[in-house]
Image: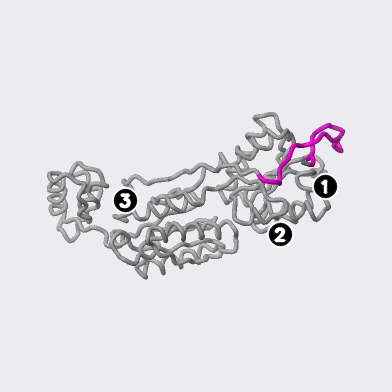
Amino acid sequence: MSNSKRQAASILDVARAARVSIATVSRVINNQPVVAEATRRRVSQVIRSLDYIPSVAARSLKLRPSRLVGLLVPDIENPFYATMAKHVEIAAHKAGVNIVLGNTGGDPVREKHYIKILADRLIDGILLCRTAYRQYRIQDVMGRSIPCVVLDRYAGRETLPSVRIDNARAGRLAANHLLALGHTRFACIYESHKVIPLWQRKEAFAEEVRKNGGRVREEDCIETGERINDATAIMKKMLRGSPGRRVSAIYCSNDLLAFGVMQAVLALGLRIPDDLSIVGTDNVDQCLNMMPKLTTVAQPFQDIAGKAIELLLDSREGEFDQDLPIQDVLLAPYLVIRESTGVPRRVEFKDGLVGRAGRGR
């Protein structure tokens, strides 16, 4: 086969032929002094023999004085994405990287359009908070090799690095906190089952509750829309019916839904945590503005943003070779206890059973 038809060599090919790591090849390419001279000569010889050409787009992220990265989010009005964008910008600024923000509106077609535009405009990298509905492969849209990191989702079949939290652990943390307070009957409000991280939190919460002798019925695990008003409406309906008499604590798969639940509880003249304890997930900035302040399972936004920028800066090659090891960084969430959870008190439920409901502090 002629050289014109031969597939271009990748950084992995160089690393294998020179019997070194990909990182070592990158150090040689970027003329870093930490490589032994004999190793440098061997890698350089392989690069010449394979006619290897480094990815200019990826290397520019390290070398250009003004580095530009696109951040795409589904809804900038959503407190979660607003908080994420804030921490990404802070981490990027510290690393000397400039951020361009795109709001996809949760529309996969619009998201795809933004990715293509950013790639065509020679952006240095993309940080992507994907929509819930994946209808295409990111690499197929970009049309060229540039670094891309997925935030808050597992990249799945995409050969891309990702940074996210352990969502199952988030659900377990919420369950164990409420169980430790003495609650035995629970409800769970979660966004669409198509949003995998939120579904994972709900499943882990319910499993942990049942494993420890608590009660969370399937009909008390309620799927709702993504807006505050969606959670408020579904919660009012629940509290006005018999399920509202069965539970003393509610777990919400994100803080936005928790805000809606709190609105419903207060609108019906109930008290938090006296009548109901509520736990959210994410720890967005608005949690401190709620009355009472929301207990939540926090995402380490600063660590997520810092790691995502680090992965972009380290993606010197930018090629999406199936053989390259892809990093899926899983960070630990943590519990932040505030005012929306409390110790339950004994009450008699409508069905004649004796349970526990929220008690004033």
Q: Which residue corresponds to the image point at 39% horizontal and 46% vertical from the top-left?
A: 327
Identify the mark nearer the N-term, 1 or 2: 2
| Residue highlighted by disc 1 | 241
Under circle 3, the secondary element is: loop
| Residue highlighted by disc 2 | 229
| Residue highlighted by disc 3 | 321
Under circle 1, the secondary element is: loop
Q: Which residues are magenta?
A: 338-360
Tell me, yes or no, whether the highlighted magenta stretch contains residue 350.
yes
C-alpha gap between disc 1 and disc 2: 19 Å
**Which of label 3 and label 2 is nearer to you?**
2
Image position, residue 236 (x, y; %): 78, 53
Q: Residues within 10 Å of mark 2 (few under 14, many from 20)?
A: some
The circle on residue 40 is none
Instruction: Give amino acid for label 1.
Output: Gly
Instruction: Give amino acid for label 3.
Output: Asp
Residues marked 1 and 2 touching at CB (< 8 Å):
no
Image position, residue 19 (x, y; %): 19, 41
Instruction: Give amino acid for label 2.
Output: Asn
Image position, residue 60 (x, y; %): 29, 62
- Residue 56 vs 212, above or below: the answer is below
Q: Quadrant of the N terminus?
A: bottom left
Image position, residue 334 (x, y; %): 56, 42
Under circle 2, the secondary element is: helix
Identify the mark nearer the N-term, 1 or 3: 1
